[in-house]
Image: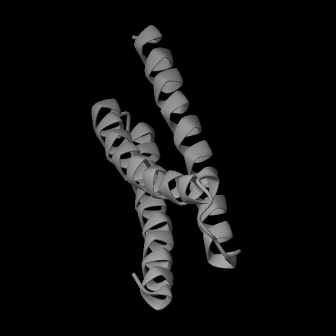
Amino acid sequence: MSEEEFDNKSVKDTMDIIINAGDARAFIAEALDDVGDFNYEEAKENIKKADAKLVVAHRLQTKKLQEEAEGDKVQYSVLFTHAQDTLMTIMSEYNLAKHLITVFEKRDQKSK
């Protein structure tokens, strides 16, 4: 693979991290809207969809980090830094949303 092809693949993979993380964020927002509507089953389905997107993004990030750990030359990239920041922020949102679904579902079951 030429250096140009490698750079193009690296940028594509980095953008795929951002896109998948962004898709996960949209599913998280839908899940939280579902909680507001007391629709916990739909919220859980949207959280599963978010999780699937985060798994893809995380695997891409891990692949890039493993390449560097194995000694491959990796140039600093503001775009990759942005992708990591985006992914980690959305993973935090995911964890919080998942917990909120549980908390509100428990609260609503106790009030019945």
Quarter of the figure with the N terminus: bottom left
45 sits to left or right of 98: left
- Looking at the image, which residue is at 50% across and 86% down? 3
Q: Is residue 17 above or below residue 94?
A: below
Q: Is residue 77 above or below residue 109?
A: below
Quarter of the figure with the C terminus: top left
Give the camera-side residue of 77 and 108: 77
- Looking at the image, which residue is at 52% across and 43% down? 94
Give the camera-side residue of 68 and 26: 68
- Looking at the image, which residue is at 51% across and 71% down? 14
- Looking at the image, which residue is at 41% across and 47% down? 55
73 sits to left or right of 52: right
Q: How many marks are shown on the rendered structure?
A: 0
Q: How is the image coloured?
A: one colour
19 sits to left or right of 64: left
Locate residue 42, reporting x and y percent. 28, 39
Locate residue 15, reporting x and y percent. 47, 74
Locate residue 13, reporting x and y percent. 44, 70
Locate residue 82, reporting x and y percent. 65, 69
Give the camera-side residue of 104 and 4: 4
Give the camera-side residue of 77 and 88: 77
